[in-house]
Image (spheres, grey):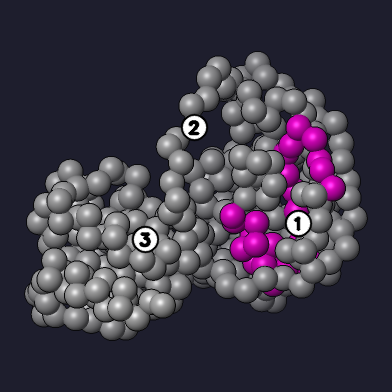
Amino acid sequence: MSNIVAFIELSQDGGPGPGAREVLKAASQLGDPIAVLATSSLSGSTVGQLAALGAKGVFAGETELTSSCLQEPEVETLAKAVQALDPAAVLVVNTTSGREIAARLAVRASGGLTADAVAVRKQDGMVVATRLVLGGTYSVDSTVEDGLPVITLRPGAFEGQARPAEPVVTSLGLKVDTRAAAAVEAFTPGADSHRPDLRTAERVVAGGRGLLSKENFVLVEQLADALGAAVGASRAAVDSGFIASGAQVGQTGVSVSPELYVALGISGAVQHRAGMQSSKTIVAINKDADAPIFDIADFGIVGDATTVVPQLLHAMAVRTP
């Protein structure tokens, strides 16, 4: 089978990040998944975790510059992996850094970039990536006819896990040209949150302008905590100052594909649906029976979210032992 490069972003503790399962699963649908990562030192624990997630090979570029040189070590490692492995495609999770890394690799490898794919497959010997376009109204299939396909994957769109494997490990010392690279002079970690990351969460509770105030938006957070979910929002809620812009879901915000998406007071404008309508189960609560969100919802409640959600929280508390 063809080699398929699966780029692995690392978490703060140095292990595979939350997108590792999905990118290796997607790679296994196309060929032999080879996990590629840049690290200061490849540990046996990291190799073991990648093996459990289905990596048939681990290719690591080692350099002390991973924490001080922005994205250049990752791009250089991928370029070395492409030269050594001659892959049929390179897959990268569609995170903020992943998008830039993928684009830079596509230029360096004279390949073609397909962004935000929700499915991949092999057809007639070619790698086909499926994307949602025009606000999620249509799906299109994209191929790269001349050059290496570099594909970013929408977080949450790929279910399941590849079979565990016994990977062949390749580790090489990396020489990074820092002359044109952005240097990291200081790093301030964000505030710790007990909630899941919005991009990769299995459950998301999002609020919109229909909640009317920042005080009412607390209901979104309460329901999210009760469900073990991430908190999201429509652009209207962000523009109204209910929550910071990092929670925005939609065409100009974060794209999500959770198992459960609960929309509270969100009308369902096409820009919002573009970022969430690939969710597996959608529940909508809105007092407007004609709100577009009900067109894509699996379950809907016509009612004021500020009234319905407290009742829901009470019912959940009563049923919890």
Question: Picture coordinates of residue 130 (x, y %)?
Answer: 52, 69
Q: Measure the C-alpha gap from mark 3 to mark 1.
A: 28 Å
Type of amino acid at the residue the image marks with label 1: Gln
- Provide the secondary structure element on which disc 2 rests: loop
Question: Picture coordinates of residue 160 (x, y %)?
Answer: 62, 74
User: In this figure, which residue is indicated by the disc labeled 1?
Assistant: 49
Q: Nearer the viewer, residue 220 or 155?
A: 220
User: In this figure, which residue is indicated by the disc labeled 3?
Assistant: 225
Measuring 14% from the left and 60% from the top, which residue is drawn there? 211
Q: Nearer the viewer, residue 213 or 65?
A: 213
Q: Please state the extent of the stretch shown in magenta in the rendering.
A: 18-44
Disc nearest the viewer among 3 and 1: 3
Question: Picture coordinates of residue 39 (x, y %)?
Answer: 74, 37
Q: Residues within 10 Å of mark 3 (few under 14, many from 20)?
A: some
Mark number displayed over residue 189: 2
- Provide the secondary structure element on which disc 1 rests: helix
Type of amino acid at the residue the image marks with label 2: Pro
* Label whose residue precedes the other's in the sequence (3 or 1): 1
Q: Are marks 3 and 1 in contact (CB under 8 Å)?
A: no
Q: Measure the C-alpha gap from mark 1 to mark 2.
A: 25 Å
